[in-house]
Image (cartoon, rainbow, N blue to C red):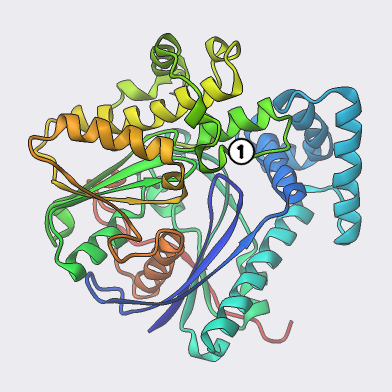
Amino acid sequence: MLSIGLMSGTSMDGIDAALIFTDGVVGNIKELGHSSLAYPNEFKLLLKAAEYSVRKFQGNMVLAQEYYPQAVEDFLKHQLNLSNDLLLTKKKALNRYLIQHGLACTLPAIIELSTDLHTQVVQNLLAATQHAPEQIAVAGYHGQTFFHQPKIKKSIIVGDAQRLANSLHITVVNDFRSQDIAAGGQGAPLAPLYHQALAVRDQILPVAIVNCGGVANVSLIFGKNHSEMLAFDTGPGNGLIDQWVRKKTQGSEHMDYNGKYGKVGKINEPVLAALYQASTRQQGQNYFSMAPPKSLDAGDFQLIPEIESLSLEDGCATLEAFTADTIITGLQRLNLNLPQRWILAGGGWHNPVILSELQSRLSAILKADPIIQTADQAGWNSQAMEAQIFAFLAVRSIQKLPISFPNTTGVANPLTGGSIFAPNLLQ
C-alpha cells in the first residue's frame, strides 16, 4: 500500500515527507518520492521556546502553556544570551511573524501552525509525485518532540493528528511511542525495524546503521529476524553543537553548516574529557555509564562550564569530536563482534568534521578496513529516511504488527503502537 511518513526532528530545522510502497513486511519496500520544508528562523525560535517551556515544567502542558509567552523572552535572554538591544529586535521580528500568520503568542497556536506546515509539505509531495489523497492508505505523523523522559513515563510529542487527517483527507497514525513507554520501554529508538527492512531487501547483512540527527543512535543488524538487531541512542548527535552555535551567534545561526567552524578549530582534550562527565545526564545519572537499552531527549544535553572559554571554532571542533567519540565508546562497551559494513544516515553527516572524526575512530577499532558509506552512497535517501521510517511504521500500526522490541526499546515483549485518526470530512 502507499504510505506517507512525516518527520520533524529535535533539531527543529524543518519537515521531511516521504512516500513509499510497502506492506509493512521486512524487505518489501519501494521509495517513491520525498519533499521537505525548511522552517524560517522565526519559527525555529518559537518552537525552541515552546520546547524550553515544556521542559521547564517537566512535561506539564498546563503550566507550559501558561508560561509560554514569557518563555519566548526567557529563551532569547537566557539560552541565546541576547543583549537588551538584540532582545528587543528579535522580539519585534517574532511578533511580526506571528501577526503575518494571524497567530497569538500561545503554545496551542504554535502547535496549530506546526500541524498546518505538515499539511503543506504533504500537499507538495502529492503534487510532485502526481498522487491524489484517495490513493494514499495512511500517513505516519511523528509530531514535534518537546520532552522525552521514559523513566518517568512521559513523552510530549505535539501535533494535531485529527486536524492533519481532516486537512489531507488521509487517515493519519501518530503517537507511536506512548504504548511502548507505558509498557516499560524507552519509546525509542524506533528506526531499527526500518533499517533492518532495508538491509534485508538489499542483502547487506550484517550491517551497522548510525543515524546522526539532534540525537545520535546506532542500529546493529545481524540477520533478518527481529531478535537479530540491537539499537540504542549513543549521545548528542548535533544537539550540543547546535546549542553552542546558537549561543555563540546569539541565535543568528542554528548549526555548524558544513563544519565551517569545526574545520578551523582545534579539539580541546580536557574539555572533551569533561563533556563525558557532565554534559549528558538523566535524572542525575551520567548517561554514558548506563547500559542499553537506553534513549535520549535533546533536553538531556547541556553545555558545561568548561566549554564557555573556548572560541566558537574550538568549541565546534571539540563537540564534533565528542559526537563521534560517544558513538565509538558506546559500541565498544557492548563487547560484540561489530559488522564491517557501516551506513551513515541523518543530517549530521553533512558535517565533514563529524564524518572524518567517526571514520578515523571506527577504522582504529575494527580488525579490517571497514566499508563506510553514507546512506545516499548505499542507494538509500539520507534526508528522507526518518520520514520513510514513519511511513513504514504507520502501515505496521494499522495492521497491529509490532514496532518495538526488547532489544531496541527494552520493552518486555514485541509491541505495536500508534493511534489512528480517520479524516472527518464534515469539518
Measured as percent of width and height from the top left, residue 314 is found at 52, 20
- In the rendered view, would you say 195 is above or below 124? above
Q: How many tags in the picture?
A: 1
Q: Secondary structure at mark 1?
A: loop
Work out which quarter of the rendered image holds the N terminus and state it.
bottom left
Could you say where residue 70 lies in the image, as x and y percent from the top left?
83, 33
Q: Position of residue 62 (x, y in %)?
A: 72, 42
Say which of 53 and 279 sits in front: 279
Q: Which residue is mark 1?
A: 59
Front residue of 4 and 349:
349
Quadrant position of residue 289: top left
* Quarter where residue 393 is shown: bottom left
Q: Residue at x 34, y 36 (%)?
A: 356
* Whether residue 345 is visible: yes
Amino acid type of disc 1? Gly
- For mark 1, does the 10 Å Cα neighbourhood hold few (<14), some (14 to 19), or many (20 or more) residues? many
Left or right? Give the position of 229 relative to 269. left
Q: Which image quadrant: the C terminus?
A: bottom right
Give residue 313's position: percent from left, percent from top.
Answer: 56, 24
| Residue ID at (19%, 35%) | 363
Seen at 60% across and 48% down, the residue is 12
Q: Determine which quarter of the picture holds residue 271.
A: top left
In the rendered image, is residue 301 in sight? no
